[in-house]
Image: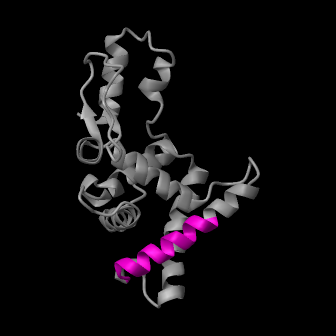
Amino acid sequence: MNRREAIERVALLMGGTVIGAEFFLSGCKPTEKQTEDLFDAEHVAYMNEIGETILPETSTPGAKAANVGQFMAVMVRDCYTPDDQKVFNKGLSQLNDASDKKFGKKFMEADAKQRTALLNELDKEQREYNKTKKPEAPNHYFRMLKELTLLGYFTSEVGATKALRYLEIPGHYDGNVPYKKGDRAWALS
């Protein structure tokens, strides 16, 4: 069962009493214009590598282990407006072009150090862009990539159980949980 199915079932079990149940049942479903596949396996692999550069494997699995590329593809296809889809797709090309301009090779051919340097520059660029962004202006593509990477990773089984401490809900409330400096944050389900 995927996340969307789980949300739909919870809304149905509650008899539609969830505020915005209509949204739960129809919110992130593709419209007629969004049904065509925007991403192929090559795009998903590319987005996985971008995600892995943002959240690399350390003592915990990285973004690629959570298959954030596939998560991004589904979210962009099913939940983004056509305008945001265009910005995102164009951004994937712009990222490759920036890598080619800076290193003389595409992002997928660059080594880990080069990828990190490039994404750090793009992160700085998107922060500056967002400082002066007008409300009607489009989002910055790197901001979308970064947010989708973090959302996809930390809501995945890998992210919730390996990077975060996992606590299955329902459980009991304990308002006095000991915390040691350096403990991982909690993931609840």
Instruction: Identify the residue at horizontal 74%, vertical 48% (top origin).
Output: 136
93 left or right, relative to 175:
right
Residue 105 seen in render = yes
Q: Looking at this view, is 186 or 61 the one in front?
A: 186
Instruction: Identify the residue at horizontal 48%, vertical 31% (top origin).
Output: 27
Residue 105: percent from the left, percent from the top?
Answer: 43, 87
178 left or right, relative to 32:
left
Name the residue furthest bottom: 104
Q: Looking at this view, is 121 or 59 the one in front?
A: 59
**Displayed quadrant of residue 43:** bottom left
**Displayed quadrant of residue 126:** bottom right
Q: Is residue 124 magenta?
A: yes
Instruction: Identify the residue at horizontal 42%, vertical 24% (top origin).
Output: 25
How are the colours assigned in the image? one colour
Q: Looking at this view, is 149 or 13 the one in front?
A: 149
In the image, residue 102 above or below residue 50:
below
140 left or right, relative to 61:
right
Q: Quadrant of the C terminus?
A: top left
Residue 35 seen in render = no
Instruction: Identify the residue at horizontal 56%, vertical 60% (top origin).
Output: 141
Q: Quadrant of the N terminus?
A: top left
In the image, residue 153 above or below residue 23:
below
Residue 187: percent from the left, percent from the top?
Answer: 32, 35
The region drawn magenta spans 110-125
Q: Is residue 151 magenta?
A: no
89 left or right, relative to 124:
left
Q: Main secondary structure of the magenta part?
A: helix
Residue 91: percent from the left, percent from the top?
Answer: 54, 66
Q: Looking at this view, is 165 or 181 the one in front?
A: 181
